[in-house]
Image (cartoon, grey):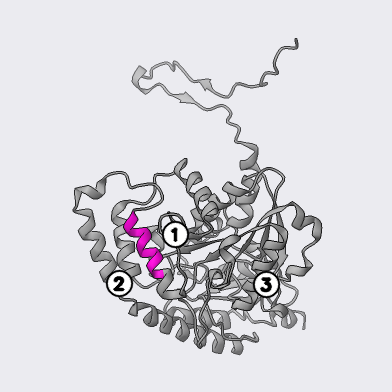
Amino acid sequence: MDAPARRSEPLYEVVGPAVGVPASEQTIGVLAMEVSKRMKSIPPYIFAEIDKKRQAAVARGVDVINLGIGDPDQPTPKHIVDAMHKAIDNPANHKYPPFGGTPEFKAAAAKYIKNRFGVTVDPATEVTSLIGSKEGLHNTIMAFIDSGDVNIIPDPAYPVYKTSTILAGGEPYFMPLKAENGFLPDLDAIPADVCKRAKLIMLNYPNNPTAGIADLEFFKKLVAFAKKHDLLVCHDLSYPEMTYEGYVAPSIFQVEGAKDVAIELHTLSKSFNMTGWRIGFAIGNPVAVKALGSIKSNCDTDIFRAIQIAGIAALEGPMDHIEACNKLYIERRDLAVKELTKLGWNVKPIKATFYMWLPTPEGMTSAEFAEIMLDKAGIVVPPGTAYGPQGEGWFRMGLCADKDRMKEAFDRMAKHEITFDMKKKAKV
């Protein structure tokens, strides 16, 4: 029998004993450490990289205006914070929470879904808690995608859809979201061999990053498509309350038969200004919900009880902050439309989310434009390629800064001649 292969270099090397160094200060140094193949297969998280560039600019003394973040700038409503304060003082809440969420939190989630969408879900079997929807997305993929399986994902899309598929050993298939189709995918254009190998299809409406919207007719087609090809639909419903001009975002479960093929992820992050609290929930097909919960029980111990109590206060309490926040987002959106039009962009008002998906100047890549915005004007915007190949030629602008800061950003763009036709002007 052949001898087992050996590393050419040891993983660790003991350093010392060093002359003149007390024994208590001797250390073990790392000579080499090899990360997993799955770690090598994914790029650095794009928003962490963008934040590094922002911090570097700040360190240079730049007054950075951050229009790249999807983080509400308004505080968490007071009644939610007060519920958290009270819950923290109760020692009963300091213990491990039950897996899948407390019965009270799951009941509150089910009640919210019934009141908001007219959909009935069983808190015991069709609801599970999430430490934010990002975790839920990752663990849904881990629960259903095996090595070699296809996950059908939008392009552009939230980067976790792709990276978590790769981490699971799966293969992402990109559905193009194009402006001429209202940023809805053409399901009929997905090749038959892809559908045969796929186990999961992921969508997100209202959409990040495009702000595209979907109606119940689209979800009816999606449910029929999933049944035809034996797919699980994962709908990432992160922006249900952030809607304007009479548009009301639907749940996929308003379609008859959707529970046969779908799971839907909800988060309190955007609608309740709770991004840092990390709380959400998933609803839908009981087999899918149970699978997601099983993955979670093996890798986390759920949400701190006091945060779940705050979540109940959010879901069952007054929601007048939603209208107030939406009014702010509309004012900022209208300012952006006005100022970007002056700078040469052809902009239509969005009907949902707090993102604007905008084309870069002709002949300029997404990365080049994002770099110019930061280096010349001190403005952070993510390049469209952060969201997938179809994002080339686009950038995302957020509405999470107050009107004065946004106006200053547009004034800086004008001052530095950052306009939609800047490449054309440069050639003249």
Q: Earlier in the sequence, mark 3 or mark 1?
A: 3
In this view, 335 is above or below 221 = below
The picture places residue 80, in percent across and down from the top left corner, at 29, 67
The picture places residue 41, in percent across and down from the top left corner, at 66, 44
The picture places residue 339, in percent across and down from the top left corner, at 55, 87
**Where are the magenta residues, as a range?**
103-112
**C-alpha span from label 3 to label 1:** 25 Å
Q: Earlier in the sequence, mark 2 or mark 3?
A: 3
Magenta stretch: dominant SS? helix
Q: Identify residue for label 3.
A: 221
- Closer to viewer: mark 2 or mark 3: 3
The disc labelled 1 sits on which kind of residue?
Phe
Residue 291 located within the stretch drawn in magenta: no
Q: Identify residue for label 2.
A: 317
Q: SS of the residue at dot 2?
A: loop
In this view, 206 is above or below 83 = below
User: In this rendering, does residue 76 appear at all?
Assistant: no
Q: Residue at x 62, y 81 (%)?
A: 417
Identify which residue, 260 or 48, lies in the foreground. 260
